[in-house]
Amino acid sequence: MLELAIGIILGCCALGAGAAMIAGIGPGIGEGNAVAAACEAIGRQPESKGDVTSTMLMGCAVAETTGLYALVIAILLIFVAPRMLVNILMDAVGK
Amino acid sequence: MLKRFDAIDPTVRKESLYIASVTGILSLLLQAGFLVARHWDYTVLLGNLLGGVTAAGNFFLMGITVQKAVAKEKKPAADLMKFSQTVRLLLQLVVAVLGFALPCFNGYAVIIPLFFPRIGIMIRPFIKGKE
Protein backbone atom coordinates (compact mmCIF):
# COMPACT_ATOMS: atom_id res chain seq x y z
CA MET A 1 0.00 0.00 0.00
CA LEU A 2 2.84 2.36 0.89
CA GLU A 3 4.58 1.58 -2.41
CA LEU A 4 1.38 2.40 -4.28
CA ALA A 5 1.09 5.75 -2.46
CA ILE A 6 4.72 6.59 -3.27
CA GLY A 7 4.13 5.58 -6.89
CA ILE A 8 1.07 7.84 -7.09
CA ILE A 9 3.08 10.74 -5.62
CA LEU A 10 5.91 10.28 -8.11
CA GLY A 11 3.51 9.86 -11.01
CA CYS A 12 1.54 12.98 -10.10
CA CYS A 13 4.75 14.99 -9.75
CA ALA A 14 5.90 13.86 -13.21
CA LEU A 15 2.47 14.62 -14.72
CA GLY A 16 2.47 18.04 -13.05
CA ALA A 17 5.94 18.81 -14.41
CA GLY A 18 4.84 17.85 -17.90
CA ALA A 19 1.69 19.94 -17.61
CA ALA A 20 3.70 22.92 -16.34
CA MET A 21 5.94 22.81 -19.39
CA ILE A 22 2.89 23.40 -21.64
CA ALA A 23 3.30 27.03 -20.58
CA GLY A 24 6.60 27.03 -22.46
CA ILE A 25 4.66 27.13 -25.76
CA GLY A 26 3.09 30.53 -25.06
CA PRO A 27 6.20 32.73 -25.05
CA GLY A 28 7.35 31.25 -28.37
CA ILE A 29 4.09 32.17 -30.06
CA GLY A 30 4.09 35.62 -28.43
CA GLU A 31 7.68 36.35 -29.44
CA GLY A 32 6.96 35.18 -32.97
CA ASN A 33 4.02 37.59 -33.25
CA ALA A 34 6.06 40.44 -31.74
CA VAL A 35 8.93 39.92 -34.20
CA ALA A 36 6.51 39.70 -37.13
CA ALA A 37 4.96 43.03 -36.09
CA ALA A 38 8.43 44.53 -35.63
CA CYS A 39 9.41 43.44 -39.16
CA GLU A 40 6.37 45.31 -40.45
CA ALA A 41 7.21 48.40 -38.39
CA ILE A 42 10.83 48.44 -39.55
CA GLY A 43 9.68 47.95 -43.16
CA ARG A 44 7.45 51.01 -42.78
CA GLN A 45 10.03 53.15 -40.93
CA PRO A 46 13.56 51.80 -41.50
CA GLU A 47 15.12 54.68 -39.53
CA SER A 48 13.50 53.42 -36.31
CA LYS A 49 15.24 50.02 -36.51
CA GLY A 50 17.42 50.59 -33.42
CA ASP A 51 14.55 51.71 -31.20
CA VAL A 52 12.24 48.92 -32.39
CA THR A 53 14.94 46.25 -31.90
CA SER A 54 15.76 47.52 -28.42
CA THR A 55 12.12 47.64 -27.29
CA MET A 56 11.42 44.24 -28.83
CA LEU A 57 14.45 42.66 -27.15
CA MET A 58 13.22 43.80 -23.77
CA GLY A 59 9.67 42.68 -24.57
CA CYS A 60 10.87 39.26 -25.67
CA ALA A 61 12.94 38.85 -22.50
CA VAL A 62 9.89 39.71 -20.38
CA ALA A 63 7.73 37.26 -22.35
CA GLU A 64 10.34 34.54 -21.88
CA THR A 65 10.15 34.84 -18.12
CA THR A 66 6.71 33.20 -18.26
CA GLY A 67 8.31 30.12 -19.77
CA LEU A 68 11.00 30.26 -17.10
CA TYR A 69 8.40 30.23 -14.32
CA ALA A 70 6.97 27.04 -15.85
CA LEU A 71 10.46 25.57 -16.11
CA VAL A 72 11.19 26.28 -12.44
CA ILE A 73 7.87 24.73 -11.37
CA ALA A 74 8.64 21.64 -13.46
CA ILE A 75 12.17 21.32 -12.02
CA LEU A 76 10.90 21.72 -8.45
CA LEU A 77 8.18 19.11 -9.10
CA ILE A 78 10.77 16.65 -10.37
CA PHE A 79 13.66 17.23 -7.96
CA VAL A 80 12.26 18.74 -4.75
CA ALA A 81 8.56 17.86 -4.36
CA PRO A 82 8.77 14.02 -4.50
CA ARG A 83 11.31 13.80 -1.66
CA MET A 84 9.33 16.28 0.44
CA LEU A 85 5.98 14.55 -0.15
CA VAL A 86 7.41 11.07 0.47
CA ASN A 87 8.93 12.33 3.75
CA ILE A 88 5.53 13.75 4.78
CA LEU A 89 3.92 10.40 3.93
CA MET A 90 6.54 8.46 5.89
CA ASP A 91 6.03 10.76 8.89
CA ALA A 92 2.26 10.26 8.61
CA VAL A 93 2.50 6.45 8.64
CA GLY A 94 5.23 6.57 11.29
CA LYS A 95 8.10 4.95 9.32
CA MET B 1 36.46 36.58 -35.09
CA LEU B 2 36.56 40.40 -35.07
CA LYS B 3 34.49 40.52 -38.25
CA ARG B 4 31.86 38.34 -36.59
CA PHE B 5 31.78 40.69 -33.58
CA ASP B 6 31.32 43.66 -35.92
CA ALA B 7 28.38 41.87 -37.57
CA ILE B 8 26.46 42.06 -34.28
CA ASP B 9 23.95 44.91 -34.21
CA PRO B 10 25.11 47.75 -31.88
CA THR B 11 21.71 47.68 -30.13
CA VAL B 12 22.04 43.95 -29.42
CA ARG B 13 25.63 44.48 -28.19
CA LYS B 14 24.58 47.36 -25.90
CA GLU B 15 21.58 45.55 -24.42
CA SER B 16 23.50 42.28 -23.95
CA LEU B 17 26.26 44.17 -22.17
CA TYR B 18 23.69 45.82 -19.89
CA ILE B 19 22.05 42.48 -19.07
CA ALA B 20 25.45 40.83 -18.48
CA SER B 21 26.44 43.67 -16.10
CA VAL B 22 23.16 43.44 -14.17
CA THR B 23 23.52 39.65 -13.97
CA GLY B 24 27.08 40.07 -12.64
CA ILE B 25 26.05 42.59 -9.98
CA LEU B 26 23.03 40.55 -8.88
CA SER B 27 25.19 37.40 -8.78
CA LEU B 28 27.49 39.15 -6.32
CA LEU B 29 24.44 40.05 -4.22
CA LEU B 30 23.28 36.42 -4.38
CA GLN B 31 26.69 35.24 -3.16
CA ALA B 32 26.50 37.77 -0.35
CA GLY B 33 23.02 36.53 0.53
CA PHE B 34 24.22 32.92 0.76
CA LEU B 35 27.20 34.08 2.86
CA VAL B 36 24.95 35.95 5.27
CA ALA B 37 22.61 32.94 5.51
CA ARG B 38 25.70 30.78 6.25
CA HIS B 39 24.86 28.43 3.35
CA TRP B 40 27.82 29.41 1.17
CA ASP B 41 30.16 26.78 -0.24
CA TYR B 42 31.88 26.22 -3.60
CA THR B 43 28.71 24.63 -5.07
CA VAL B 44 26.92 27.98 -4.69
CA LEU B 45 29.70 29.75 -6.61
CA LEU B 46 29.74 27.12 -9.38
CA GLY B 47 25.95 27.08 -9.59
CA ASN B 48 25.81 30.85 -9.76
CA LEU B 49 28.43 30.88 -12.52
CA LEU B 50 26.48 28.30 -14.52
CA GLY B 51 23.15 30.10 -14.04
CA GLY B 52 24.59 33.56 -14.70
CA VAL B 53 26.40 32.55 -17.88
CA THR B 54 23.26 30.77 -19.09
CA ALA B 55 21.06 33.81 -18.36
CA ALA B 56 23.38 36.29 -20.10
CA GLY B 57 24.08 33.86 -22.96
CA ASN B 58 20.37 33.22 -23.44
CA PHE B 59 19.71 36.97 -23.76
CA PHE B 60 22.61 37.36 -26.21
CA LEU B 61 21.35 34.45 -28.35
CA MET B 62 17.88 35.99 -28.30
CA GLY B 63 19.38 39.29 -29.48
CA ILE B 64 21.22 37.57 -32.34
CA THR B 65 17.99 35.80 -33.33
CA VAL B 66 16.01 39.06 -33.22
CA GLN B 67 18.71 40.73 -35.35
CA LYS B 68 18.44 37.94 -37.94
CA ALA B 69 14.64 37.85 -37.76
CA VAL B 70 14.05 41.55 -38.43
CA ALA B 71 15.93 41.19 -41.72
CA LYS B 72 13.41 38.55 -42.89
CA GLU B 73 9.80 38.58 -44.05
CA LYS B 74 6.97 38.40 -41.47
CA LYS B 75 6.26 34.62 -41.55
CA PRO B 76 9.87 33.33 -41.63
CA ALA B 77 10.76 35.83 -38.89
CA ALA B 78 7.98 34.55 -36.62
CA ASP B 79 8.96 30.92 -37.32
CA LEU B 80 12.63 31.61 -36.60
CA MET B 81 11.75 33.29 -33.31
CA LYS B 82 9.50 30.39 -32.23
CA PHE B 83 12.20 27.84 -33.08
CA SER B 84 14.86 29.85 -31.27
CA GLN B 85 12.69 30.23 -28.16
CA THR B 86 12.02 26.49 -28.01
CA VAL B 87 15.72 25.63 -28.36
CA ARG B 88 16.75 28.21 -25.74
CA LEU B 89 14.09 27.01 -23.30
CA LEU B 90 15.31 23.42 -23.74
CA LEU B 91 18.88 24.59 -23.15
CA GLN B 92 17.81 26.29 -19.93
CA LEU B 93 15.94 23.13 -18.91
CA VAL B 94 19.11 21.09 -19.44
CA VAL B 95 21.12 23.60 -17.38
CA ALA B 96 18.54 23.54 -14.57
CA VAL B 97 18.45 19.72 -14.55
CA LEU B 98 22.27 19.62 -14.46
CA GLY B 99 22.21 22.12 -11.61
CA PHE B 100 19.93 19.92 -9.52
CA ALA B 101 21.33 16.55 -10.60
CA LEU B 102 25.08 17.16 -10.25
CA PRO B 103 26.40 17.44 -6.69
CA CYS B 104 28.98 20.10 -7.65
CA PHE B 105 26.20 22.66 -8.25
CA ASN B 106 23.73 24.20 -5.81
CA GLY B 107 20.38 23.88 -7.63
CA TYR B 108 18.91 27.09 -6.24
CA ALA B 109 22.05 29.04 -7.16
CA VAL B 110 21.59 27.80 -10.75
CA ILE B 111 17.88 28.64 -10.98
CA ILE B 112 17.83 32.09 -9.34
CA PRO B 113 20.27 33.82 -11.82
CA LEU B 114 18.00 32.80 -14.72
CA PHE B 115 15.62 35.54 -13.52
CA PHE B 116 18.28 38.27 -13.30
CA PRO B 117 17.72 39.58 -16.88
CA ARG B 118 14.03 40.10 -15.97
CA ILE B 119 15.06 42.08 -12.88
CA GLY B 120 17.49 44.06 -15.06
CA ILE B 121 14.66 45.00 -17.40
CA MET B 122 12.45 45.89 -14.44
CA ILE B 123 15.00 48.35 -12.99
CA ARG B 124 16.00 49.72 -16.41
CA PRO B 125 13.52 52.66 -16.46
CA PHE B 126 15.02 53.91 -13.16
CA ILE B 127 18.57 53.66 -14.53
CA LYS B 128 17.57 55.25 -17.85
CA GLY B 129 15.82 58.05 -16.00
CA LYS B 130 19.07 58.92 -14.22
CA GLU B 131 21.13 58.96 -17.46
Image: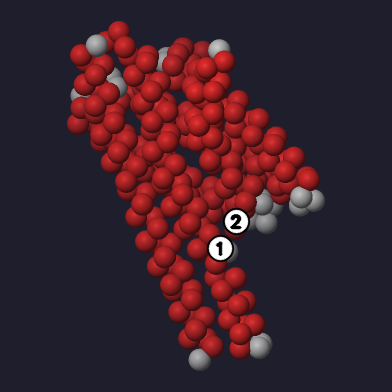
- Classify 10 Å Cα crowding around label 2: few (below 14), some (14-19), many (20 and above): many
Tell me the kind of residue under disc 1.
Answer: Phe
Marks 1 and 2, how far apart in space? 7 Å
Q: Which residue is mark 1?
A: A79
A62 horizontally vs B115: left or right:
left
Tell me the kind of residue under disc 2.
Answer: Phe
Residue drawn where x is 40% and y is 58% of the image: A20
- The quadrant where residue B50 appears: top right
Disc number at residue A21? none
SS state under label 1: helix
| Residue B72 visible within the image | no
Rendered location of residue B114, percent (x, y):
54, 41
Chain bearing mark 1: A
Does the residue at mark 1 contact the one at mark 2 (Cβ under 8 Å)? yes
Outermost residue to the top: A47
Chain bearing mark 2: B
Residue drawn where x is 52% and y is 25% of the image: B124
Q: Which residue is mark 2?
A: B100
SS state under label 2: helix
Rendered location of residue B45, percent (x, y):
71, 43
